[in-house]
Each structure stands twice: as C-alpha cells, then as structure tokens.
C-alpha cells in the first residue's frame, strides 16, 4: 500500500514527529491508532465553519464528503452521507463523477474506498494519523507467518480466512488470495456460514470478539471450538493439536473502545437505571454480549433506537460520539439514552479528524492541491477486491 501525500510549504523544516502530529506524514512501521501522541487541535470556531462551507461550495460536485458515525458533530455537519465503513465505501463507489472522495473516518476505511472507486477518483484522508488500533493488530508479515504455522500443523488446506472490514488493504488482499471473504458486523454469520461450506476451519481476522460472538452466540458453537492465535508468541501460543481440534482460529485483536466495556458496566447500569435496555456492538467482549439485551452493528443500533417506544431507557455499548448524537436526537421522544460505561471514551483516532483538518483539506483541494491521498497499489487492490466481491455475492 502506498500513501501519496502533499503538505503545505512551511517556513521551517519540520521534524518527522511534527509532521505526524499534523497529520501530513505517515509512519509505515507504526501501529496507527495504538497511541495518539499530542493534544487534539483547539475547538473549532465560527470562522472555520464559514471557511469549510465556502471551500465545499467552491468545489461543488467535484468533492464528496463521507462521515463515519463515530466522527465529531462538527465534521458530520459537512458530510454528504453518513454511515458505517462499508456503507460509506459503497456510497463513494456509487458517485463516479466525484473527483475527490474526502473520507472522514480512519485509514482502513479510506483504503476500502480507494479499492472500490474508479481509477480517476482520488480518496483523501484529512489526517493521516487517523488509524485504527484493531486494524493495526494484524500486519501482513504476522498473518503470513500465521499461515506458515497452519501449514506446518497440517491444517492450512482446511482453513478459510474471513477478515473483518476493519482491516488493512494488505489483510484483505491476503484473504482474497487464500480463498476467503470479508465480513461486516452485520453479515458476519452469513460470511462464516459460507466459509464453513468451503472448508472445515476459519481463521478470523483481526477482531477476536466479533469472531467469537458470532460463532458462539449466532452459530451455536462452544467456546472450546475457538482458539486464540497470538502473533507475539511462537506458533501463536498454540500447539498443532489445538489447531487441529479448533473450528475457529481467532486472531488476538480487539477494538480499544468496545473492549473497555465490562460485565461490571452492565451490572452497574442495570442497578442505576431500572428497566434499562442494554444494547451493545458485537465487538464487545463475550461476557458483555451475553449479558446484553440486544446486540448488533452500528446501523442496527441506530435502527433499534429509531423503533424504540417513547419513554424507553437504553444503555449503549459503542463509541461515545454516536451515543451522544443519538441521545440528543431522541431526547424529544423522551428516550433516555446513556453510554454503557461511566468513563468517557471517544475513539481517539476517529477524533483526529476535526474541523481544522477538514478545512485544510477542502481549501487545499479548492486551490488545486491534492493532500493526504490514500492509494492502494494495483496487486493489493486486485486481491482485496476479490475478497470484497465474495462478500457482495453472499446469499
């Protein structure tokens, strides 16, 4: 994967760290999103709002702005469409006349948009430091080594890889090359049903919780059918016998936000709010999902709250920007919507995309300067697209 980025001229020579904090450079050896060094830019002001409107109006139909559900309100205001990562990538592909696709999300999402859009379209990420800790928990080198371990254990020919949409283009390409498919949090069961028609075992990348929850909660497997592959241990920390006995080989990855929710969080909110409905994302830990009343994707969460009766009470286990936005949206209907955890927890890397970065991006494009372009190389794109097409063909 190659990142093409153009920075504004500066009067002084910036250091690599300074460029990274500004979102105008990338460190390909880092795990984007595991840490978020430095402070976020200062809050937006009315002048920035006016500048964003002016730049977007000047660009007209040449630009199409995508806003993920977890983005700040100040960014969502300028999004042409909102949604989860795959919906937004498909929305971008449905706008072939848009020269510039500005993806207000994180790195893997922009990669997916570049894979699905035309060669003449340019995908831009307003801040290159906006990564995803989960996606970066599985590198191409680590997954290739895992496949060698599976081969040595004599099970590779029985294994079908299934990768979550929240993965890098390299991992999607690996999946396509080895006969696997991609899944989202809403179609994971369908993807696993398909995979088990192709082989006896699944290597699920990179989110262990979505894989485990889908296998056990939705498909009737037991926890003993699942093993956890740790890329930081020799042979993944597993014996050949464990790999031969397992049905689900789960990668040791997780979402840093959804992984924070605990069984204590569920018990506490039930004690504080009698009659509350607990609704969580399937990226949460298995014990949290098992204790919840409802489990579903981001789109499922939104639709469930839309259909909820007036006066109902909800504790939501997903990213705080979305929960807060939904609480404000449904306040007029007397729906009480609270964050599942008492500790405030935004997705720090999603929050890297703020109005200052969006204004810089739009004004640069309006001036004819392409910045922070995300471009997936042709070979990676071809295999990743193959895996995505298998997902689109799922029954």
Image (cartoon, helix red, strand yellow):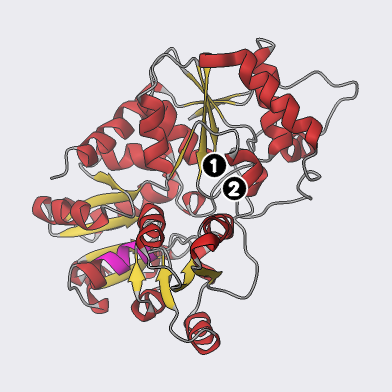
Image location (x, y in percent) of residue 262: 50, 78
Towards the viewer: 332 or 161: 332
**Crowd class of label 2 (few under 14; some 14 to 19; many from 20; radius 10 Å):** many
Secondary element at tag 2: helix
Image location (x, y in percent) of residue 299: 38, 52
Furthest toward the bottom, the residue is 271
Specify start and end residues of the magenta stretch as a single range.
209-214
Report the quarter where the C terminus lies: top left
Q: Is residue 181 magenta?
A: no
286 shown above or below 127? below
> Magenta region, mostly helix, strand or loop?
helix
Determine which of the numbered discs, if any, sits on residue 106 in the image. 1
Q: Residue at x 80, y 38 (%)?
A: 45
Q: Which residue is mark 2?
A: 350
**Crowd class of label 1 (few under 14; some 14 to 19; many from 20; radius 10 Å):** many
Q: Is residue 211 magenta?
A: yes
Answer left or right for 105 relative to 218: right
Image-quadrant location for residue 29? top right
Towards the viewer: 192 or 363: 363
> Can you see residue 194?
yes
Distance from Cα at disc 2 to Cα at disc 1: 6 Å
Whether pointer 2 and pointer 1 mark residues with C-beta atoms closer than 8 Å, the reply is yes
Secondary element at tag 1: loop
């Amino acid at each position: 994967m190659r990142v093409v980025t153009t920075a504004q001229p500066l009067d002084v020579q910036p250091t690599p760290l300074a460029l990274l904090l500004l979102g105008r450079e990338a460190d390909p050896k880092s795990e984007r999103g595991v840490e978020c060094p430095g402070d976020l830019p200062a809050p937006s002001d009315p002048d920035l709002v006016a500048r964003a409107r002016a730049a977007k109006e000047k660009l007209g139909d040449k630009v199409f702005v995508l806003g993920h559900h977890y983005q700040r309100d100040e960014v969502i205001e300028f999004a042409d469409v909102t949604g989860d990562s795959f919906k937004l990538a498909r929305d971008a592909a449905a706008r072939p006349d848009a020269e510039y696709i500005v993806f207000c999300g994180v790195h893997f999402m922009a990669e997916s948009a570049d894979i699905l859009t035309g060669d003449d379209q340019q995908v831009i990420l307003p801040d290159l430091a906006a990564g995803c800790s989960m996606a970066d928990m599985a590198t191409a080198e680590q997954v290739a080594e895992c496949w060698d371990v599976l081969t040595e254990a004599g099970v590779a020919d029985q294994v079908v890889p299934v990768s979550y949409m929240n993965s890098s283009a390299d991992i999607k390409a690996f999946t396509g090359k080895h006969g696997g498919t991609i899944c989202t949090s809403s179609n994971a069961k369908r993807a696993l049903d398909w995979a088990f028609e192709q082989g006896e075992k699944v290597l699920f990348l990179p989110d262990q919780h979505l894989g485990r929850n889908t296998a056990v909660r939705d498909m009737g497997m037991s926890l003993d059918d699942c093993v956890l592959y740790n890329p930081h241990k020799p042979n993944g920390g597993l014996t050949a016998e464990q790999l031969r006995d397992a049905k689900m080989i789960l990668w040791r990855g997780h979402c840093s936000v959804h992984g924070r929710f605990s069984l204590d969080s569920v018990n506490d909110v039930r004690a504080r709010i009698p009659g509350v409905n607990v609704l969580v994302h399937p990226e949460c830990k298995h014990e949290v999902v098992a204790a919840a009343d409802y489990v579903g994707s981001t789109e499922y969460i939104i639709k469930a709250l839309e259909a909820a009766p007036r006066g109902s009470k909800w504790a939501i286990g997903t990213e705080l920007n979305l929960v807060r936005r939904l609480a404000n949206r449904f306040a007029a209907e007397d729906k009480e919507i609270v964050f599942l955890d008492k500790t405030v927890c935004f997705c720090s890397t999603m929050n890297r995309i703020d109005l200052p970065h969006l204004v810089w991006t739009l004004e640069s494009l309006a001036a004819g300067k392409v910045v922070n372009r995300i471009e997936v190389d042709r070979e990676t794109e071809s295999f990743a697209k193959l895996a995505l097409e298998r997902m689109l063909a799922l029954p």
